[in-house]
Amino acid sequence: MMHLGLFLLGTGSHVAGWRYPGAIDRFTDIEAVRKTCQLAEAGKFDFIFMGDNLHADVTTHPSYAARFEPMTMLANVAAVTSHIGLGATMSTTYSDPFTVARMFASLDFISGGRAAWNAVTTASPAASANFGTTHPAHSSRYERAEEFIDVVTGLWDCWEKDALVADRKSGIYIDEAKLHPLKHKGKFFDVEGPLNIPRSPQGRPVITQAGGSAPGRKLAARTADVVFSVVQDIDEARSAYTTVKQEVAEFGRSPDDVTFLPGVMPVVGRTDREAFEILSELQGYVGEKDALGLLSDRLGTDMSAYDLDGPVPDLQQADTYHSFSSVMLAKAKRENMTLRDLYNLVASARGHWVLCGSAETVATTLIEWFETRAADGFNIMPPYLYGGLTSFIEGVVPRLQEHGVFRSDYAGTTLRENLGLHEG
C-alpha cells in the first residue's frame, strides 16, 4: 500500500499560501491545528509531520516563523485523534539525547503508540545564536548525530517490555532485573541511563530523516524507518529510491523496512486548467524580494547580485541544505533555467516537487511513481490550509483507493503497524 504523510509547515507549504482567499492565516491557533490533523486522519494518512527550526526566519516563509513548539502541539493533537501518527522534528545538534528519548517515549504513551522523531542535524547556521555557540561544520554535525541516535535508541531499550510489574500482591513495582543502565561513554555524550519512563507502546518510536548528502544518506540507511527526499522528476526519484534501498541493505537491514517518501506539493483543481489558475494566483502573491530571500537561504549564497534573467551561476555546495541545493541546481542545469525560473520554483514549494492538475491527473501521476518504484508513498505538502488539503483528500484519495494502492482504513492502532514495520 502507498503511504501518505502530511507535512505541516505553517499555514501551508506555499510561501504565500496564507494570502489565498479562505485560507487560514496563522498556525498558532490550536483549533486550526486540530482540524487540520483530523482532516488528515479522516483521509487515512499514515502520519502528520511537524517541521521545525530553531530561529525565527521571517523573510523566507513568514507563517513558518510563527508556530507552536512541536512536542507540545502534538501532545494536544493526540487527545483529538486516534490512529494517525504524530511526527516532530528535534535537533541532534542543539538538543541532548536523554531529553529527546524521554519526550518521544512520553508522546508514544500519550498517543497510544503513534510517535515519530524526525532526527535532523539543523542546517541553518542562524540557530547557533540562540544557543550561545557556533554552528558546527557539516561533517561534525553528522558525526554527532550518529552517536546521538545510538544513545536515544539505547535509552529506549533500557527497559524490557515487561519490566514494569506493578504487582499488588507481591509488592513488586519494577522488576529490576529487566531494567538496564546504558553506561554510554562516547566522543560527544556520557549517559548513564536508564531512561525514567518504561518501554513505550511501539518499543521504539518511529525515526524519520531527510539527509540528502552522503553522510545524511548513510545515517538514514542505518537508523531511519522513514526517509524523506527532495526530488523534481520521476527518473531522479527512481534513482534516489534505488540508492536508498541499496544502502539500507548494506547495513544488513531489509529494504522493505524503510519507507521512502518524496515531498510533493499537490495543487488540485476540478480541471487541469483550474489547478494551474490556482497556482498562478498563489505565485502572484510572492514578491521578488521574498523569492530571492528564500532562494538565497536554500542555496547558501546571496543571490541578489545576480541577473534574474541570466543563467543560474555555478555555485559551490553550501554547508546548509544539501539535498535542496543539489536537486535544484541539477534541475536548473538540466533544463537550462534562468535564475528567475529557479526562484519561481523555489517560491512555490521551497524546492520540492510541485504537482499541478485535476484530481485524476494528480492521482494518475502518484500511482505511476508508486508502481514504478520511484516512491513508497509521499509526504503531502498542501499549498494552503484547509482547502489545499481537503481538495487532495476529497479528490485524489478516493481515486488512489479505487485503484487499490491506498488503504480504506487503518491496519492497526500504532504508527509502526500502519507503516508495516516490526515493533521497535
Image (cartoon, rainbow, N blue to C red):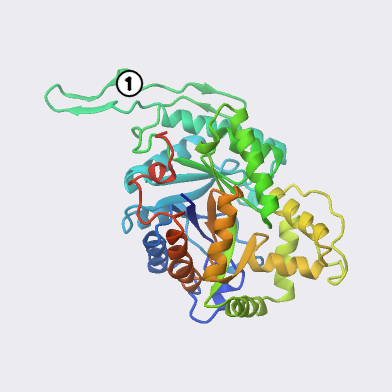
Callout 1 amino acid? Lys
Residue marked by disc 1: 178
At x 55%, y 79%, the residue is 20
Q: Would you place residue 393 above or below residue 218 in this image?
A: below
Count the numbered circles shown. 1
Outermost residue toward the front?
403
- Rendered view: 283 above or below 248: below
- 117 left or right of 77 in image: right
In front of the other: 130 or 90? 90
Residue 119, position as x, y percentages in the image = 55, 43
Mark yes or no: residue 125 visible: no
420 on left or right of 160: right
Q: Secondary structure at mark 1?
A: helix
Does 73 sit above or below residue 239?
Answer: below
Q: Nearer the viewer, residue 333 or 131?
A: 333
Q: Nearer the viewer, residue 257 or 9?
A: 257
Q: Which part of the image, by quadrant, shows the C terminus?
A: top left
Q: Residues within 10 Å of mark 1 (few under 14, many from 20)?
A: few
Of residue 17 and residue 402, the one placed in the foreground of this image is 402
Q: Residue at x 50, y 74 (%)?
A: 25
- Residue 151 position in % (x across, y down): 51, 30
How far from the left and from the top, in percent, is residue 184? 51, 23
Tell me if I can see residue 313 in this picture.
yes
